Amino acid sequence: MFCSGCGNNIENNESFCSHCGKPVAEDASQNQNNRPTLIGYSPNIGSQKFAQYQKKSIIWSFLFAGILAVITIIAFPIYGNASGEIAWPNSLFYGMGIGGMFIAIAIGQTWRKKLDKTWDGVVIFKDAYRLRERTDNGITNYQNVYEMKIQKDNGGIKKYKWRNVIGTYNYYNVGDRVRHHKGLNYYEKFDKSNDKKILCIACMSYVDIEKDICPRCKCPLLKL
Ligand SMILES: [Zn+2]
Ligand SMILES: [Zn+2]
């Protein structure tokens, strides 16, 4: 079982959490009448369906980059010829340079996901405010800013700032224990027992917490 205070794995014979010191007996009675399947990190992150989804999304990102690359390689010489601004074969080289960049970006993104690591942390700060900005020609603009900070267990703070889009700001509360899963831009909550909705880790849509499978992408939701 898991500690309700910090998410630490607790051996059956322990009466206190070795990590944060919370009494275990109290946790057990609390869990029984409090939707026990919604407390703890879900093993569904390792599901086959989710692995398939991740594989597919990598294939799609390369396919998309490949199509963009082919279009630019063809379009540059055509544009160069029609406008007379870029001579052949320079137009082809420009096209190949920019087309190659799309492929390089896709490789870079995939590589970054592979190098990423899973870590645990706590949401320590949330703030929403309006930012006033004056542009050079005297017009005043307002921006809605949403900030969130997560303290990592192994040190360091992960900061988030959304501008004019709320992102996943409302999903988290200060004090939530969360887990960052390798390669994903999403935090699994340790305790989901007070939630009515759960975020699908694959397509990032909000789904009714009673469901087990995301109706949109068919991925198992991160529940126990
Ligand atoms: Zn604990
Ligand atoms: Zn989904």
Image (cartoon, grey):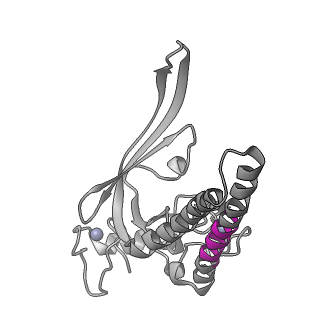
Image quarter for ligand 1: bottom left
What secondary structure prevails in the magenta region? helix
> Who is closer to the viewer here, 2 or 222?
222
Q: Residue furthest right?
A: 82
Residue 177: within the magenta? Answer: no
Q: Is residue 106 above or below residue 82?
A: below
In the image, residue 70 lies at what x, y percent?
Answer: 69, 67
Q: Could you say which quadrant of the image residue 20 lies in?
A: bottom left
The residue that appears at 42% across and 66% down in the rendered structure is 180
Residue 67: in magenta span = yes
Asked whether, in this view, residue 113 is left or right of residue 52, the answer is left
Q: Position of residue 201 (x, y in %)?
A: 57, 67
Give the number of callouts.
0
The answer to whether any part of residue 167 appears in the image is: yes
Q: Tell me: residue 147, above or below residue 120.
A: above
Instruction: Give the magenta range.
Output: 56-68
Q: Nearer the viewer, residue 212 or 101?
A: 101
Please indicate whether residue 81 sits to the left or right of residue 182 in the image: right
Residue 110 is left or right of residue 73, and the answer is left
For the point 48% across and 73% down, the residue is: 32
Asked if 56 appears above or below 215 in the picture, the reply is below
Please report the residue visible at 59 percent of the width from the left and 57 percent of the height from the top.
94
In the displayed structure image, the side of residue 85 where residue 144 appears, left or right = left
The residue closer to the viewer here, 211 or 124, is 124
Q: Quadrant of residue 165?
A: top right
Which quadrant of the rendered structure holds the N terminus? bottom left
* Position in image of residue 215 (x %, y %): 73, 69
Picture quadrant of residue 207: bottom right
Any part of residue 182 in sight: no
Residue 69 locus on image (x, y percent):
65, 65
